[in-house]
Every structure is written in C-alpha cells, then in structure tokens.
Image (tube, grey):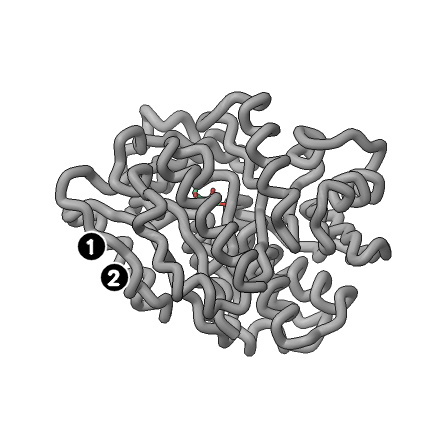
Amino acid sequence: MRLVTLGESLARLDAAAVGPLRHARSLGLGVAGAESNVAIGFSRLGGEAAWIGRVGADEFGGLVRATLAGEGVDLAAAVVDPSAPTGLLVKERRTSALTRVWYYRTGSAGSRLSPEDVPEDLVRTAQTLHVTGITAALSATARKAVRHAVATARAAGVPVSLDLNYRAALWEPDEAARELRRLAAEADIVFATEREARLLVDGEGPAELAGALARLGAREVLVKLGRHGAVACCDGVLHRAPGVRVEPVDPVGAGDAFAAAYLAERLRGVPVGERLAVAALAGAYVVTAMGDWEGLPSRADLEREPGDEVLR
Ligand code: KDG
C-alpha cells in the first residue's frame, strides 16, 4: 500500500488551558498539517506514506521532519527551504467544546510549494495520490503544484483522493468553490463535510449532497457527519455508517483520520460499508486525544472487539 500526499505541515502551539488565548500562560508544541496527518494515519495502519512539502531550515522545520520520520513517513521528497520560515498555527481552546485556530503561514516555506517540488516518478508509482483544498489555497504556486500532481497521477492511472478541507481563513468561498469543483471533477475519491459539500453543490441532506458531488466526476464520494457517522455514494450506490459514541476532547483531525483509514482499507480491498465503519472508528479515536493526529489508531487499536471500553 503506497500513498503519496503533498501539502504544508506546520509547527503547532496548543493552549493547555480552556479560555481566551491571551490568558494561556503555557503552550504545548507539536506538528499539524492535514496531509501529513493523513500520511501518519495511513502509516500507522501498515501502509507506506510519502509526504511532499517544504519546511524552513529552522527548528520548527526540524520538528516537522523529525515527527513525520518518527511516524514512518517517507520524507525523501521533502524540501528544506533556507529562505522562508516553517509555518505556524496556534490552537485556542476557547471553550471545552470550541477550538479555534490562528495561522501564521503567509510567506511560509510550505506555502512556496511549486510544481517543480513534485517528483513525477513518486506520484506515478503511488497507489493513491491524496490532496486537499488547503494546499490549493496557500499560494498560486502551491495551487499549481496540486494541479500538476493530480494531472501526473491521472495520466499514470493512479487514483486521486481529494479532501475538500475548506479553511475559511485561507480563501473566499467563491474562489474556493471554483477551484474545488475543478479538482473534484478530476478526483476518483472525494471527502467532504456536509458544509463543504454545500459550497460546491446543492442538495437537501447528506445523501443528496453525496450524489450531487459524485455527478461532478468522482466514483466515490464520502460525506462525513461527525458523531452521526458518514454517507458514501460509490458507483451510484449509497452506503451509510453510524457514528461511534465518544467523549471528544479535541475535534481537530477527525476528517484526516477518516480519510487515512478509508484509503488504507480501500487498498486492502475491504468492502465499502466496512471501510466506512473503520474510517468512522478512526475519526472517533483521534478526537479522544489532544492533538490533530496523536490519537490516530494503529491496526491493533482498530481490531479491538466492538464494545470495548477504549473509546467510552
Ligand atoms: O485537518 C486538521 C488540519 O486542519 C490541521 O492539522 C492543520 O493543516 C492544517 C490547517 O491548515 O488547518
């Protein structure tokens, strides 16, 4: 199983205490980045994942590289850029149920990703290319890098997976909708929340939205519903997975966990209904731990008997 992904990974500062950030007296240090979260999740489930991206020649860049390498992610295509800093995000726990994110990434090394950074052979020999709307929103060159990777994968018959991952702080809805529709038309697999789906298409509920997204071009569309599970439209057939009941402590990263597990199970030949259920379980795992990816499950975690106390 070989997954290739590209995007920006950042240093992450986490407020330990609940409340306005200005009153946080200490911040934890970690790593964030939707695409690298997926790479870690995929690697923890036994796959080989390679990450393409740029970090600065600074300590935060070292942190990103050490963390991804420690999780078994292949960094042969990662570029160290001496002329720009590694991007940073700060997570505020505004209330126990509401997390807010502040970005410091304009002009970052990661946002300078360009088509020349995408090794075509790596993409051509992958079994899945995974991209997200975040990278397309970072800069004109990063958007071209995404388009180039997608075109390279398509020409080689490599399935393209797209997580819409709309981030309102990075671009305007109209511009996002235009670019995401274009990418969705070229993808084989599309992941969306209900809200993200509505940015691109019209529809009453999740099933209609999944069908409408599928009409843009992808054979597999997954609409994630958080604690209510997910709906999939695969080759015109609808599937549903119920949610997994958990006590979430940090909601960030659930979608990446879902995508990582879905893509891993897909490559293992697991049927759609089952891979949806595994993906929902992976999402549940990640929200029960602090951090965007730290709680991602291993295969042993996923194979626990249903009804185990682990997630309750
Ligand atoms: O999906 C979680 C990501 O959003 C997070 O890890 C940080 O990539 C990130 C972003 O751009 O928000």
* Point 63% across, 35% down: residue: 181
Task: Please give the label number shown on residue 128.
Answer: none
The picture places residue 281, in percent across and down from the top left corner, at 65, 62
Q: Amino acid at mark 2?
A: Ala
Whether label 1 lies within 8 Å of ligand 1 gets the answer no
Q: Looking at the picture, does residue 88 appear above or below residue 247?
A: above
Say which element carries label 1. helix
The residue at the point 43 percent across, 37 percent down is 143
Which element carries disc 2, helix, strand or loop?
helix
Dividing the picture into quadrants, the one containing residue 166 is top right
Q: Is residue 125 left or right of residue 106?
A: right
| Residue under pointer 1 | 62
Above or below, comparing residue 260 to residue 208 in the picture: below
Q: Residue at x 48, y 25 (%)?
A: 171
Residue 66, labelled with which disc?
Answer: 2
* Few, some or many residues within 10 Å of mark 2 (<14, 14–19, 20+): some
Which corner quadrant of the image does residue 240 belong to? bottom right
Residue at the outermost front position:
155
